Amino acid sequence: MYWDKKGKEMTDATLELAVNKGEELKIKNFVVASSTGYTAKVLAEKGVKVVCVRYHAGFKEHGQQIMEEKDRDELESKGIIILTTTHLMGGIERGIENKLGGATYSTVVANTLKMFGQGTKVAVEIAVMALDAGLIPFGKEIISIGGSGRGADTALVLEPSHAKTFFQGAIKEIICKPRNF
């Protein structure tokens, strides 16, 4: 499915398509990016196992977490696993870019994936982050859901590999994404 536009207005339809594809392919593991917890909560209400990847502390403001602690606590009370860690395609390389300029390898990878839309880059990135944290199984297809800012507009079936073997991962199917972004 290709959406005419990007953004949070596509969240409910994106999650519905993702869950339906999961049922069709018997995929049990879902990874979702969420800054407030809303998307993760809605996905979990559909009865699937959810790993929620949130922004790392300091993403916008030094030492500060974007997701409210009360929202994190609510997600955890619903059995949602929360992953808070440095972003795969950021981290120390972002610090080098910010200080010295130029582009690093991870920036090239990120911008290549963004040619398919921001949500595609996010979905691939969070899947690898969840795999590296041991929160999803290696060698299994998962569904990963990302977006272009708030909400979700992209869902992929993929088999991620660890960061150190990133290019051994594979995007198996695009469930949905914005056509215009």
Image (tube, rainbow, N blue to C red):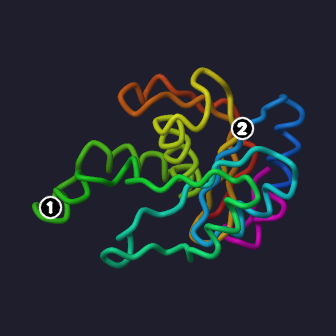
Disc 1/disc 2 C-alpha distance (Å): 38 Å
Helix, strand, or loop for circle 2? Answer: strand
Determine whether 110 is above or below 138 in the image: below
Classify 10 Å Cα crowding around label 2: few (below 14), some (14-19), many (20 and above): some
In the rendering, which numbered label is found on residue 101? 1
Residue 126: x and y, percent? 53, 47
In the rendering, which numbered label is found on residue 122? none
The one of 42 and 90 positioned closer to us in this rendering: 42
Residue at (61%, 67%) from the top-left corner? Answer: 72
Task: Work out whether mark 1 precedes mark 2 in sequence or the reverse, and give the earlier one.
Answer: 2
Residue 153: x and y, percent? 69, 60
Residue at (69%, 63%) from the top-left corner? Answer: 75
> Which residue type does callout 1 highlight?
Gly
Residue 53: x and y, percent? 56, 55
Residue at (40%, 25%) from the top-left corner? Answer: 165
The one of 125 and 171 positioned closer to us in this rendering: 125
Residue at (64%, 48%) from the top-left corner? Answer: 51
Task: Work out which quarter of the rendered image holds the C terminus and state it.
Answer: bottom right
Of the two numbered discs 1 and 2 in the rendering, the one whose residue sits closer to the viewer: 2
Q: What stretch is highlighted in magenta?
A: 1-14
Which picture quadrant has residue 180?
bottom right
> Which residue type does callout 2 highlight?
Asn
Determine whether 180 is above or below 145 in the image: below
Helix, strand, or loop for circle 1? Answer: loop
Q: Is residue 103 left or right of residue 173?
A: left
Residue bearing the label numbered 2: 29
Residue 93: x and y, percent? 23, 51
Which picture quadrant has residue 144?
top right
Classify 10 Å Cα crowding around label 1: few (below 14), some (14-19), many (20 and above): few
Q: Is residue 130 magenta?
A: no
User: Are the residues tagged 1 and 2 within 8 Å (C-beta)?
Assistant: no
Q: In this view, does 112 lie to the left or right of 95?
A: right
